Image (cartoon, coloured by chain):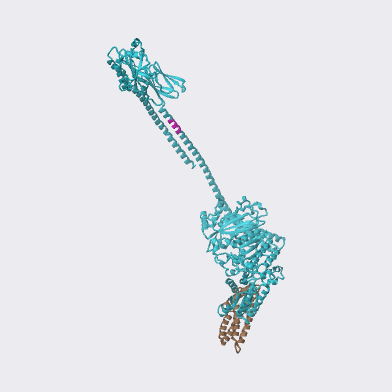
Amino acid sequence: MITSRPFFCFILLALIGLLLSTSFIPFGVSKIKQVEKQVDVITKKSHQEIWSVIQNAATTTLLPMKSSATNLAKVANMSLTETDITFYDIQAKVAPLLFQAMVTIPHLSQISYIRQDGLFFALYSKDHHQIVAIYSNTSFSKATRSRFHYLWYTQPVNSDTGKLYGDAVVFPPQLLINETWLQQALNTRNGFASLGKSLNDVNNLLVLNTAGVDKNGVISLGFELKSLINVFSSVKPLGGGLYLATRDGKVLTEGIPNTRMVLNGNGTFSFMLWKADGYQSGSITLQLNYETPQAYTLDIPGTKYTLYSSSVDIIGMQLVYVLALPYEGLPSRMHKNIIFVFALLSATFVIVAISIFSFVVLTVRASRKEMCLRAALIKQKEATQQAERKSKNHSLAFVSASHDIRASLAGIAGLLDLSISNVQQGSELAVHMGLMQKCTRDLKSILNSILDTSKIEAGKMQLEEKQFDLANALESVVDLFYPVGLKKEVDVILDLQDGSLTKFSLVKGDERKFKQILANLLSNAIKFTSEGYVSVRAWVRKPRLQNSTFDSSHNQSRRCLSCFFSNNDEVHGDLEAIDEVRHDPNFMEFVFEVDDTGKGIPKEKQASIFENYVQVKETGPQLEGTGLGLGIVRSLVQLMGGEISIVDKEVGEKGTCFRFNAILKVCQSGLISLSEDEKTVSPGDLSAGSNTPLHHPRQLDHNSSIVVLFMTGDGRRKMAQNSLAAQGIKVVAVKNTRQLSETLREFRREEKNDCSSKSDLNLSFGYLTWPTSRDSNTRSREVPLSSLDGTDMSPIRTTNTVSLSNFILLVIDTTKADFRELCRTTAEFRKYSKNGNSRVVWLGSRCIQLQGLDEKKLPPSDIIIPMPLHGSRLYSLIGLLPEFGGKFSSPPNQRQAGTKEENHHPPSRQLEVQEIARISPSSSSPLRGKRVLLAEDDAVQQTIAKKILLKHGVTIETCRNGKEALTMVSKGLSDQRNLGASHILPYEYILMDYQMPVMDGCEATRQIRLKEKDYGVHAPIIGLTAHTEGEELNKLFVAGIDIHVSKPLNEQKVLKVIEDLHSRK
Amino acid sequence: MDTVSQLQRQFVEYTASLYREGYLDDQFTQLQKLQDESNPDFVVEVVSLFFEDSEKLLNNLTTALHQENIDYKQVDAHVHQFKGSSSSIGAQRVKDMCVVFRNYCDEKNLDGCVVCLQQAKNEYILVRNKLEALFNLEQQILQAGGSVPMMV
């Protein structure tokens, strides 16, 4: 309706336009007719003019010539007075006269004086220049008498004087006297005009104007017909013709080509038509009266002509002429053109009309279609809104219903609990009740997920904004699922890639929801994976601009989003808020990938996988769940301003890879860009400001360490290898025991080569080396594991040297390999490797003992790290390397850091350290496994010191005075020498009290230093005094202590002094 | 229940008073921290050791100061040891006394030394009583089934 109105307007306009233009047509036609009339008039006028010109030419130019012959005759008559005229008379009197006339009268080509008796004199112009005379000097009578032939002679005439000159040539005579025109001329006084022939040229027609001079002679003036007709030819009209004829029917000129005019005696004409080839095709007879000028029309096939016939008098000769002018000349041609133009115009009109019509039709059709679409859209919108309202109401109802269900469910669960406690244990009823309890729990979890969904749908889900450690959360979730995966023999790996996450791990967000997302994805991944591994990858990047495009299917979630972000319903505002988030440098984009090696999701199902209540059915009937998981996950991810998608795997790779991201605010003041961060964090700056758990390699180029990874799980091995390599550590990953032993053997060979060149490095490093503990020797007899160790009988040890060039960290995964074999390989490696230049890290599940791995049976330098090895555990592993701040052989430095800087540390590390500490209590202490000599006379102080040291896993030997101390050191040194390991210290640290009976600390220190010189070693001696400064202290330093501790001793002081001692070196 | 908490409160108050009145210092806390499951009586052991040691030393000092020719060096060594052990368990007032004692010793001031010895004895006895009382309280709490509250 709405559209038809402008459409009709348009039609109206078009019609008006057409009508206006058609109304112009009659006007134009009348105008054209006027023009035609005018043209007609003009044509007629022009015809008239042509005709009058002809008449004029005939009368004005030719009329005067008519009387010239008569006049001339009169003059001649006067000069010829004699009756008997001789040729001489003629020559004397008539000839000059003739000459004068010849020269003066125009168009004259021949003039002659003819006598009846045969005397004759004529002049004619030959080629208009030369005048030639023809004469006959004898009369007929004379000739017969003198028996001479009657002869004519020609002689040229001087054109200036008129005298004859040259020779007279005989000219064939013509009998002129009998000619009719001569006779008539003789009879009339007033001259006579006729058509005759030229004297010298028979074909040349002349108009002869003859007048009698006397009774015997005439003067005849011959005008050339051609030159007379030329007068008319100047008016020869375009496309027409002019016919001239004498009255007696002799046609002089022909007009229109291929026609011939025939003059009939009774004043009529007939036209003969000739074809181009010369045959007559027909004749037309016209009753024309030429006496009075008249106009006729003649239709010669092809063209119409208008004929004007009239008679004209030329030099006394009556001629009839017919002027044929094309009837259809200009006007008819114009008419034709006009008609053509009209035709064109009308065609244009028609075309315009047609096009307008078709345009209108198309417009109508289009608008009609648009209307339909609009109507459909409106309907659809209404339907959508209605559906949404319904759905929302539904969801709200659902939320409240779920709540009620939950309440009843809680009641059931509570009652069940009560009943179970009352039921006799082990009875069938108890078993059933247990099952019921399990069912209740399942039901509750299902209900929870439904409740979550409905909450999201109803827009009631709110994000908590709380600071939390993302890396920690990630790891805790992964660790939580590790045992789940273990049950199915599926490895669950956390892959922090380049470690970027740890730098920004302190974020603000909803930890619970994040964990929920991850747990959901992980449980799915594990559920659908029957072999292989599930890997969780995480990294940080700067937020991409415009990283998510909301397509229509996200419409709903967008609405949800808006509900979550704020309570008003302005979707746009919220989207802008998200955009702002993307621009804020404090916001980082965290990307997570959950990658499994399960059966994967078929391509066509991928699109619908995130929809609620959708489960890929083919996966098998044994799998349970409501199918709400991924829907919730997606909603939650979008709630966090991220996107979730399935990443396409490369061809041939199994499984599914879910990727989601979240934009979270990083809670750190010093936000440095990812790349710069690497450089700016100084090595010692373990925890200040940044969360970086790692020291950076101090001398990466020089004495780099090698980590030998022995892991059976492919995924985990790769992850660990990559993570270590990302930190710039050389990694050798091996897959099976055979490879492991080969690799280790290879190292040994290399070491041997190194030994020869670097043998003198050992002295400076002696005290820092990591000797095998003595008690492991003592234990070695009872434990088969350590007997394989072969620490004390090693022949290599006597000659080996310390080179820092390759610190080897052997990481052995015990979970899946034959433990015995591993031990054997390791023992072999240990046997040949240089002392303290390698460490072994055992990876085991929490129940290590079951696998035969017993901490107590291992050398004290070995460390046991529980599986799974990833995240913070991996970083603590890296921390063991000398370049990464791990003091060479004072391994887990983190302990100190952990206690000292607890507050700054991310909780994950602290936790981790504690965890390791719990499993192998003193493994994290820098003092673990050390042998310390304590020289202290006071029982109380000795007890306390012992207690502190024991707590840190130190093997203590005590003595009560300086002398004893000296003896013990000397003995130890000589023992070592006997063993051939003189550079190995008997005690890593000596704690020396200043004041002691028998020999004080000062003296003892001095003596020990003297003794040590023989062996070329230097054991760190820590002086114990009650003073922090003064003479006593100076004495001790002079005696050769390395550092001192002020009494009373306590744990912190001891640890601090050990740390100081190392940091000083 | 009630008795335990009452005892605990008493214990806490008592300990606090000991610190407040300067009988004990931070070192004693350190000592308590060293005590763990593997050695639950560590503090008691050490303190007992201290008592033994101290009594021996005090006796030695008494005899030394009562001799004709007083070996001040010997006295100083004893005092030093006394000071060391007392500081080790955190018996602050005893330790402070020892510092004064050593000064008199350096001056070879017999009167001062004697007075100091007496005062040191007094202080020692005081702290011993206090500590014994504390341990008693502790014992009572443990017997009542409660746990000894940690002083931080």
Q: Residue furthest front?
A: A167
- From this view, report whether residue A631 is shown above or below residue B112: above
| Residue A840 showing in the rendered view | no
Residue A369 position in % (x across, y down): 52, 42
Residue A479: name its quadrant: bottom right
- From this view, report whether residue A621 is shown above or below residue A1004: above
Q: Choose between A579 and A796: the one closer to the eye.
A: A796
Residue A437: name its quadrant: bottom right
- From this view, report whether residue A918 is shown above or below residue A222: below
Q: Choose between A585 and B1: the one closer to the eye.
A: A585
Chain drawn cyan in the picture: A
Chain part drawn in magenta: A337-344
Q: Choose between A785 and A619: the one closer to the eye.
A: A785
Q: Residue furthest bottom?
A: B68
Q: Residue furthest top?
A: A145
What main secondary structure does the magenta stretch of the protein show?
helix
Report which colour depicts chain B: brown
